[in-house]
Amino acid sequence: MSSKIRLIKNGSLVLPDKNEPIEGDIYLEEGVIKKINLETDSRKKEKAGGDGVIDAKGLLVFPGLIDMHVHLREPGREDEETIATGTAAAAAGGFTAVACMPNTLPPVDNQESVMFIKQLARDCPARVYPVGAISKGRAGKEMSEIGEMVHMGAVAISDDGSPV
């Protein structure tokens, strides 16, 4: 989102502490949320408009979406996708985070692989949550070091399409 946007008004806000969307306004400074106003009376008095204002009437406004199954392909298949290009595409589509599957070359089956992904993702526009492989090499024979991968930041385990 452009840092020139200063107000998203009249949106149906999907908030983690509410059971259903609630109409409200979001105030931003330099692309950072500074205030969420849900008070009907004060919102009616304010007639903000013009440049930097988005009228989101009839639209859902989310804090961010997470794609729990992406194939970033790095390391090993950078010709198809990289962590940088995949997260840029995710962010352009409104996703603030992705969980990347372990079907890379080599597979994400150890703590070093998890660290590699996390280091490459540091400056990306969407957060990257590595998913570690259940088995070494995704071969379904020997269990990988799941505890070590979780300790380094893997958020889930999967052999992603390979039988275990």
Image: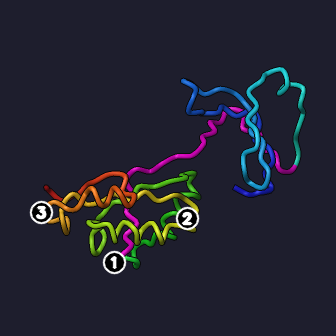
Quarter occupied by the N terminus: bottom right
* Amino acid type, residue under disc 2 in the picture: Ala
Vertical arrangement, residue 56 with respect to residue 145, above or below:
above
Vertical arrangement, residue 80 with respect to residue 37, above or below:
below
Question: x and y percent of residue 55 in the render?
Answer: 77, 39
Q: Closer to the camera: disc 3 or disc 1?
A: 3
Give the Cα distance between marks 1 and 2: 19 Å
Residue 162 appears in which quarter of the rendering?
bottom left
* Amino acid type, residue under disc 1 in the picture: Gly
- Start and end of the magenta stretch? 51-75
Q: Which residue is mark 3?
A: 142
Give whichever of discs 3 and 1 has the lower sequence position.
1
Question: x and y percent of residue 134 in the render?
Answer: 21, 57
Q: Residues within 10 Å of mark 3 (few under 14, many from 20)?
A: few
Which mark is drawn over residue 76?
1
Q: Residues within 10 Å of mark 2 (few under 14, many from 20)?
A: some
Q: Which residue is mark 2?
A: 88
Q: How many marks?
A: 3
Q: Which residue is pictured at 30% across the width and 63% down the height?
A: 102
Give whichever of discs 2 and 3 has the lower sequence position.
2
**Is 90 on the left-hand or right-hand side of 29?**
left
